[in-house]
Amino acid sequence: MIDLETKATIDYTYNVPVKRRRKKAKIKGAVPLYFILVVYFIVVAYPLFWMIINSFKTTDEIFSNSWAMPEKWLFSNYSHAWETGISGYFVNSLVVTVSTCLGTVFISALGAYGLTRFSFKGKNALLILCMGGMMLSPQVSLVPLYKLIQALGIHDTYLALILPYVAYRIPITILLIRAAFLDVPKEIEESAVLDGCSSWAVFTKIFLPLNYPILLTGIILTAYFTWNEFMFALIFVDSESLKTIPAGLMQFRDALQTNWGVLLAGLMISAAPIILLFLFMQKYFIRGLAAGSVKG
Amino acid sequence: MHVNHLLLKKEEVNPLPIRKLVPYLYLAPCIVMMGLFVYYPIVENFRFSFYDFSAFSPDKAFVGFTNFINLFHDPVFYTALKNNVWYAVISIICQVFGGLILAAILEDPITRFISSFFRTVFFLPVVISVTVIALLFTFVYEPNMGILNSFLHGLGLDSWAREWLGDSETAIFAVIAVSQWQSIGYIMMLFIVAIQAIPREIYEAAEMDGAGKIRRFISVTVPQVKEMFFVASLITLTGAFTVFNEPYILTGGGPGNASEVLGTLLYSSAFAKDQMGYASAIATVILILTLLLSLVQKKLFRTGKDD
């Protein structure tokens, strides 16, 4: 009894200051961490913030006072940018992105289904072929791709972008979808086959609906890639009327040499869709990036 | 019995050959797309690098190793290679090490209540198109009213202000800085995912043993995310040797050739000077460099796995 009591008092007298000391140490330890976070926050957020406020100003005001809030919020910069060419680039980007996403995810899902649900000769070789595509960067094939696109007669069309985009996105998308398809229990498929379903019916009626989250992840990652891709967009399309946003912005900049507010508004319009997609679909986005990083 | 027998026989004789074809049918679109647009160009590029030809003429002249010999005698090639090496070194330090440290801070229980906010903001540059970011940074680096020089004037460091992109000493580093600004968030997010997979008990045990924050970072976090560390370095190194967008938009390789990288050299050889064979030779060098890097990485990774 006495023992227990003394132990309790010892615990009591000993513990309280330790806890308090720990709490103090904890707060002290947090200061440098928060310092790093806040500094990096300013480094990242300030240029973005600067872009937002200055996209509502006249060029004169940007020059004389780029740090302050706009005296008058010029929403007209946005309509001006939209009419000066962004609208056309925007539509082109939309067409190319939607086609690329649908093409990539559909073809990859077919491939992933073939790779996971059948055993056949050359399966491993094909798997390696698919994965190997991830190691190859498009820069390396620029000249032959350019020649190929000329030879196919699709230079300066939407297809000159869509087809290479789909091809380069297939490896990573197959990898994502294959991992999900491997987790589908065999029993579901077997019972469907017993009910007389063909493999095509199993694919469209069971595998696609069952795995829609991963298909969505595939679509989001492909959209992110396609909306922002610059090099192919610059080289494979010449006509101003067919350019997507990243390549079109170069022309837009040259056209607006002196009208900075409108240029910044154009940058804002170009970045907005993918930022919104990210903010609303963050979970799918990050899951895909993480799964996709497991290269080689 | 009879019926059963018939059924079996029918299955054996008839649908089997078709069934054998089925998986190939599912894979056919992938194989065609990747074969045509990914693998065939790689092989062609290798072949092209031994020829001399122009974009719009069908004639090709076989020149053997001439393109490579010219390339290895071109001083611009070495400038570009040096700039790519700078890109790689700085990217490893900022993105891989910086990204890991940011990830560890954001996963520390002490910052948890606000970490998702910082995480989202830090990741924002990743989702914005590189064209938008590069054009935004032409304003950051603008000599007269740009954010960077205004900031330096504000701090009283007037002598530090300069024409960042127009000065051949600083141009490549200004370009590299933009890539870091954009990509640290991506690598950080990869490390966050890796850190979240570490069992909490390990941290608790380390804390019980009296390990402080830094000690826990070094002896728990770092070894546990080793795998992601190698993946992240492979991504940044490959990116550093294939980079094109940022230098092309910000400086076009200039002033002079001061900020040229292999990617911009390839582009200008092919599409400005119309030396397609020479450009293919540059592409072959890039391919060999990236393949070597990934082989070295794989080897290191494997030895890393053993212990």
Image (cartoon, coloured by chain):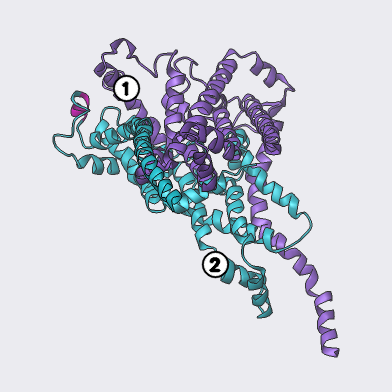
Chain colours: A cyan, B purple
Q: Position of residue A177 (x, y in %)?
A: 59, 56
Residue type at numbered disc 1: Leu
Residue A240: x and y, percent? 41, 39
Residue marked by disc 1: B148
Which residue sits furthest bottom?
A: B2
Q: Chain of mark 1?
A: B
Tell me the crowding category of disc 2: few under 14, some 14 to 19, or many 20 or more residues within 10 angstroms, Cα based. some
Q: How many marks?
A: 2
Rendered view: A49 above or below B161: below
Label 1 sits on a secondary structure element that is helix
Residue at mark 2: A210
Which quarter of the rendered picture does the C terminus of chain A lie within?
A: top right
Q: Nearer the viewer, residue A80 or B126?
A: B126
Closer to the camera in the image, A292 or B264? A292
Query: Image check: B250 left or right of B277?
Result: left
Give, as a single range, the part of the protein colored magenta. A59-63
Q: Is residue B13 left or right of residue A153?
A: right
> Is residue A240 visible from the viewing direction of this image?
no
- Furthest-top residue in view? B159
Which residue: 32% across, 26% down? Answer: B139
For the residue pair B33 and B180, the one nearer the viewer reads as: B180
Q: Residue at x 67, y 69 (%)?
A: A186
Image quarter (top left, top right, bottom left or bottom right) of the N terminus of chain A = bottom left
